[in-house]
Image (spheres, helix red, strand yellow):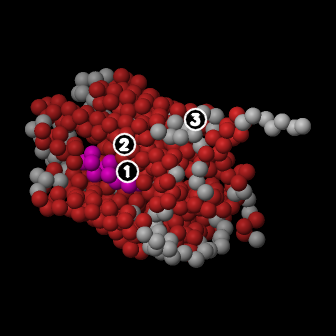
Amino acid sequence: METQRSPWVALWTLCLGFFMILLDMTIVAVANPAIMDDLHTDISNVIWVTSAYLLAYAVPLLITGRLGDRYGPKILYLTGLALFTVSSLWCGLSTSIEMLIGARVVQGLGAAMLTPQTMSVITRIFPPERRGAAMGAWGSVAGVASLVGPIAGGLLVDGLGWQWIFFINVPIGVVAFALALRFVPDLPTHEHKFDLVGVGLSAVGMFLLVFGLQEGNDHNWDAWIWAMIIAGLLVLAGFIYYQSRDIGEPLVPLALFKIRNFALSNVGITAMGAAMTSLMLPAFFYLEAVRDLSPTKSALVFAPTAVFSGVLAPIVGRWVDKAHPRVIPTIGFAMAAIAIAWLAERMHPDAPIWTMMFPIILLGISMACIWAPLSATATHDLPLDQAGAGSGIYNTTRQVGSVLGSAAISALITARMSANGLHSSTNQNSGALPAFVVHPFSSALAESMLLPAAILVVGCCASALFARHAKDKAARQAAAAPAEVVA
């Protein structure tokens, strides 16, 4: 039978598609200045290349996991992979910023179909005693992608053009599809009711909120912009109220948020998603536009973050089960906030690039103390029958954080440029920045970096409130109880 094949073959097959999705999230940041130049657009528009993808990725995540249960994770994985691969070709062939943004929306939908199925299949084909090692291998893909993505993006943009950061997905996608068709098992399906009203409310609310934040500064925060933002918040409030009613099978089981560590972990991972997205945009604009580094050299500047994070993650992982849940991630968030604030202080036109290595290395150390410990804490106390729903919510809040971070950093960069006497189209044309623009543009980018630092402080506060795990607490109470006296 197909299901008797080694689950590790299926795992590494799934990891190839998952790697491509993660690679695409990191590779585009390096190419933004080149896209802006070639398609004759400005910062506000080019940031929508990321925002549109993240929005289309985030909104359907809750429903696509349940679609996998209903129709089979293999079918959803293959469909999402095919959609992602074809839309990658469309991205590379785009001749306008509007065409590229449209293609990125379709790409995001493909990614949303694919991503939940990877964890679902792994959970179902590995026995509990081997699942930890499997999830560890699956999680290591993220660290590799965070290193390979910017460097590969730099090499492709420098050597072949920005279009190839998308064209490269086509052969990878074809190979991944063939391997998944052969090695990923068909698994039993389950009946599910789908909360289509919840999907609609969350999609409309998120779109209104993100679009308002993204476009606000360009339209001088007119009344209709504020109306969109307020309407988005009201729709999202309506979504939460609707989910609280007894609707049979809600999109988001709100009862899970009664578990303290799960609720706080979602605050933490939202902060991480927002901080990482809002960090990379000004950082790469600074390196490429202000310091005139090539995309490849810019990516290599941040390579130590991925190296230190990848090397230290297994070591930190061995400490997680022994320490109180709040210790490691709280330290990690604090270090990350300090690292980004330090990096912002170094972002002036005359700073030696080597002095940026210290905060960049500190950022890598902090990442090892956040990602895995936060995920472990989020899922530790979940009931087994709610583990899938909890994982879906956790991944969705991370993506929502990324969407909001992308929108917020766009608005802040544009606002700081205006405050410094610049227009958002300052770097629209090719070539080095005029001398009189360098300092105010650099200052605007550095000031914008304080946003992700502030967001990480929120994650630090959430982590500091973690309680001891329920099972650990019960064990400690049992150990402290006086021994029963036997007559």
- Mark 1 lies on residue: 401
Pick the quarter of the image with the N terminus.
bottom right
10 Å crowding of disc 1: few (<14), some (14-19), many (20+): many
Q: Secondary structure at mark 3?
A: loop
Taking the view exactly as shown, the residue that stands out farthest to the right is: 487
* Distance Cα–Cα, label 2 vs label 1: 8 Å
Is label 1 or label 3 in front?
A: 3
Pick the quarter of the image with the C terminus.
top right
Q: Position of residue 391 (x, y in %)?
A: 53, 56
Q: Is residue 10 above or below residue 295?
A: below
10 Å crowding of disc 3: few (<14), some (14-19), many (20+): some
Taking the view exactly as shown, the residue that stands out farthest to the front is: 487
Instruction: Please state if 299 lies on the left or on the right of 143 as rendered.
Output: left
Is 409 covered by the magenta stretch?
A: yes
Q: Is residue 119 above or below residue 270?
A: below
Q: Residue at x 58, y 61 (%)?
A: 386
* CB-based contact (under 8 Å), mark 2 and mark 1: yes
Q: Main secondary structure of the magenta part?
A: helix
Q: Which mark, residue 38?
A: none
Q: Position of residue 175 (x, y in %)?
A: 56, 62
* Distance Cα–Cα, label 1 vs label 3: 26 Å
- Mark 2 lies on residue: 275
Q: Is residue 92 above or below residue 265?
A: below
> What residue type is disc 3 on?
His
* CB-based contact (under 8 Å), mark 1 and mark 3: no
- Mark 3 lies on residue: 324
Instruction: Please state if 198 lies on the left or on the right of 182 as rendered.
Output: left
Q: Earlier in the sequence, mark 2 or mark 1?
A: 2
Magenta-colored span? 399-410
Q: Is any atom of residue 370 visible in this view?
A: no
* Distance Cα–Cα, label 3 vs label 2: 25 Å
Relative depth, front residue between 179 and 114: 114
